[in-house]
Amino acid sequence: MTGPRHGRHDWLGLTPEVERFGPILVDRIVGALGEPEGDLGEERIRALIRTGDAAAWLAYLAALTALVERGRAAGVAEAERGILAGILRDQYRLAPGVLRLAPEDEARSSQIEEMLRTP
Amino acid sequence: MSATRRRQRATRAGGAPLTLHARAYSDPELLERERREVFARAWVVVAHVSEVREPGDYAAGSIAGEPVVVVRDEHGALRAFSNVCRHRAAQLASGSGSCGKVLRCPYHGWTYRLDGTLAAMPEGRGFGEDFDRDQVRLPEFRVDTLGGLVFVNMDPEAEPLRDWFGDVAERLEGLGIERLVPVTERDVQPREVLRGLPDALRARSAKAALDLVPEPRVARTWHSYEHNWKTLADNYLEGYHVPVGHPGLLRLLDYPRYRATLHRRAAWIDGPLRDNPSRDLIERLYQRLQRPMPEFPPELAGQWTYVHLWPAQFIDIYPDSIDIWQLHPDGVRRTRTMSMVFRSPSEGARDRIARRLNGLINSEVMDEDVELCDGVQAGLESLTYTRGVLNDNENAVGHFHDLLREAVPGIDDGP
């Protein structure tokens, strides 16, 4: 029974795993990178669920992908990076069921898949 | 290999518990067994205590289609009987109310005392001189109360009600349902009244206007669905489908903290509400207006709580109201549902609006669930599907299936 049953709310179905595991993984990777605390944590996710939309969610996934990439380049937080990359892979694999991915999101999806093949 | 070990092997695959075999959702023989081996042995809610407070009060109900009636007899004792007249099987009572000192069959007038014995029948001599009316009595069942609800059990050997649901019994007692009042038909039909008002005014008839006002009878709302009863129960018991099946609800419910705790013949599901205002107008209004009823247990404020009581009764605990939803199998692919809502006796306009908004939100959720269950019922009868696997968030479904395996040996058999 695929198809746009709920329309604009559908993307919310993507959020639970990121909401559950994202904040702690982001915290650890950001900490390992020595970066200042950014706006990728729990508050951002909750705000997205409250008032966001599909485009804002994809922008958030893009920011997480960039974080994983920075962690990989710096060689830090390998375990946390691996889990977050796995979650992001699933997000990009699930997303086409509820929204249309732009070419740059497709590229990020491939980037994550590649990252998981060659950590 | 022992039966227990065989069952464990049948229900585990690579760590993930397995669902029941799909045949259990479409086999008429199994439904008959469920009626006898599950429902007829279970404690089932029939009424709210306020409906049977005084001698002569009665409330009619059903246990998977088996008509029962609870009465408060003239000595003040609560009793439960078959609601089937011994003459020609008519139902003696319907709904709830007061029957005085006797139950009278609406068909031919056979009249029973409140201890179930036959008092008299019209034209009694017409049954012949040998007919022994003293031998006629309504079959009696066990009855007890818990947490403001009246339960009936047809099985004389069943465990006492207080032990039946394990430690959920104590939590049910704490809900204060006995201090709430059931919503009546007068509460739930304002639209019908408003719709009929112009005609009544045109007729300039006080009686026509008064007739519009429904009786203050306790409202039992019935619906019928084309699903096996377990399809609906499974759907209620898990939150794993919420993000996909009801994505809008994620703005209201704090899904990461949504979890089921398993008890003996029961499951307790906590659905905490988010603090942040939802984007949706109806949900935001509900968030703003809802406040716990004075009778509400403080530890449950700020969440929606769902309780499953084996086999097919569910209590929705909202800060603004509590309702009970029961499943009554009416065929292998047909289920009748009954719901009763309880509100605070001191409910004001603000609380009433919050309760209505809650109703709007949840009726949309129910519409979505029915559509999902339509698909599931068809899928369960597919030639290509035999059984599925369960996520951690579907633990209460696994628990329910295990209870069914225990109660109906062989229910899980299949290729």
Image (tube, rainbow, N blue to C red):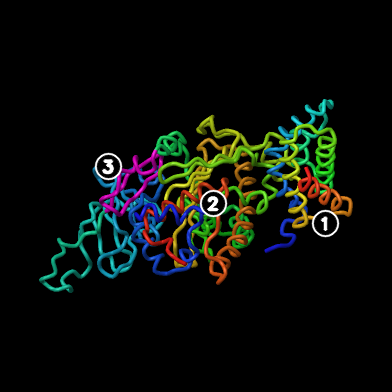
The local crowd at label 3, few if under 14, some if 14 to 19, many if 20 or more residues have their Cα within 10 Å, is: few
Which callout, 2 or 3, points at the residue further toward the start of the chain? 2
The local crowd at label 2, few if under 14, some if 14 to 19, many if 20 or more residues have their Cα within 10 Å, is: few
What residue did someone put label 1 on? A100
* Residue type for callout 2: Gly
Label 1: which secondary element: loop
Please tell me in which quadrant of the rendered image residue B377 appears: bottom right
Instruction: Judge whether B14 appears above or below B181 on screen.
Output: below
Label 3 near label 1: C-beta < 8 Å?
no
Q: Is residue A53 visible?
A: no
Q: Is residue B405 left or right of residue B307?
A: left
Q: Is residue B374 left or right of residue B148?
A: right
Q: Is residue A70 left or right of residue B247?
A: right
* Residue type for callout 1: Arg
Distance CA(mark 1)–CA(mark 3): 67 Å
Same chain check for tags 2 and 3: yes
Please tell me in which quadrant of the rendered image residue A66 appears: top right
Pointer 1 indicates a residue of which chain?
A
Instruction: Judge whether B92 appears above or below B251 on screen.
Output: below
What residue did someone put label 3 on? B76
Residue ID at (57%, 39%):
B320
Label 2: which secondary element: loop
Picture coordinates of residue B380, whole percent (x, y): 54, 65
What residue did someone put label 2 on? B14
* Magenta span includes B147: yes
Q: Is residue B17 visible?
A: yes
Picture coordinates of residue B6, whole percent (x, y): 40, 56
Residue ID at (75%, 48%):
A89
The local crowd at label 1, few if under 14, some if 14 to 19, many if 20 or more residues have their Cα within 10 Å, is: few
Find the magenta span and give its range. B141-166
* Residue type for callout 3: Gly
